[in-house]
Amino acid sequence: MRSIRIGLIGDHDPAVTAHRAIPRALELAGAALGTAVTAVWCGTETLAGGAGAALADCDGIWCVPASPYRSEAGVLSGIRYAREGRRPFLGTCGGFQHALLEYARNALGIRGAAHSETDPGAAEPVITPLACELVEQNGAVRFEPGSRLAALYGAAEVVETYHCRYGLSPAYERRLAGGPLRVVARDGAGEVRALELIDHPFFVLTLYQPERAALEGRAHPLINAFVAATR
């Protein structure tokens, strides 16, 4: 049986909780689906000159937490490769934030789209501090009816683990209105916590960490769906 290969865009650090959880989360997803899954770490600096060579053999691509990354250019190159190449893609926390940067620059034409953490004086701050930071806390996630996420979870609201200080600026949320990248979940304060690209086979961004379910030995429906989309 051929193993599904998932490219992990990020700078591997065993001290990061999400980095310990993600390979296990993929193993659990594979077990639930009856398929072997191999996680392949792709350091951000290795993607800076172009992501195609490093990611061509990957069936799916996951941009993982723990930003700032060593190479923003490498991260954005990998995300663009997944988006334009229609490869199944999952972005969690830092992956959520940088997928929004890539989309803003290359799909919306906001060439100066920036992240306030690394460029606090930017003229186009698409990613800004959240009004309510939730770090190492559990909190509600409320799904839009009819969204992919609502269907995957089979629920209108769930509790997930947050480790986030930055998210989509409300000023730029309006720029997404009517386009294919849709807001599909919010937290209890109304801030954006998940998006889906509806004209893509699988392109989901979450500002929470579903991978942490693996630390309790649980397969997660979102990660199962991501792996299933690669087959």
Image: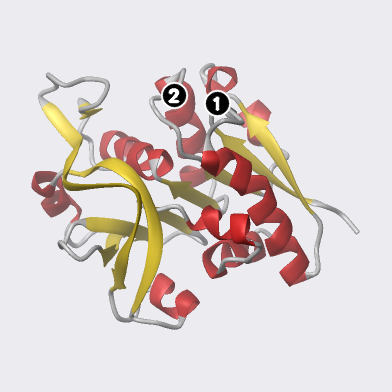
Q: Is residue 231 visible?
A: no
The residue located at (62%, 66%) in the rendering is 218
Mark 2 touches mark 1? (CB < 8 Å): yes
Q: Residue at x 30, y 36 (%)?
A: 101
Residue under pointer 1: 11
Residue at 39 percent of width and 77 percent of height: 150
Residue 90 in the figure: left or right of residue 228: left
Mark 1 secondary-structure assignment: loop
Residue 140, quarter of picture: bottom left
Of callouts 2 and 1, the N-terminal one: 1
With respect to residue 199, does 164 lie above or below?
above
What is the spatial separation of the Cα atoms under label 2 and label 1, in whole angstroms?
7 Å
Residue 138, position as x, y percentages in the image: 36, 59
Picture quadrant where residue 42 is located: top right
Look at mark 2 in the image and give the residue it sits on: 69
What amino acid is at disc 1? Asp
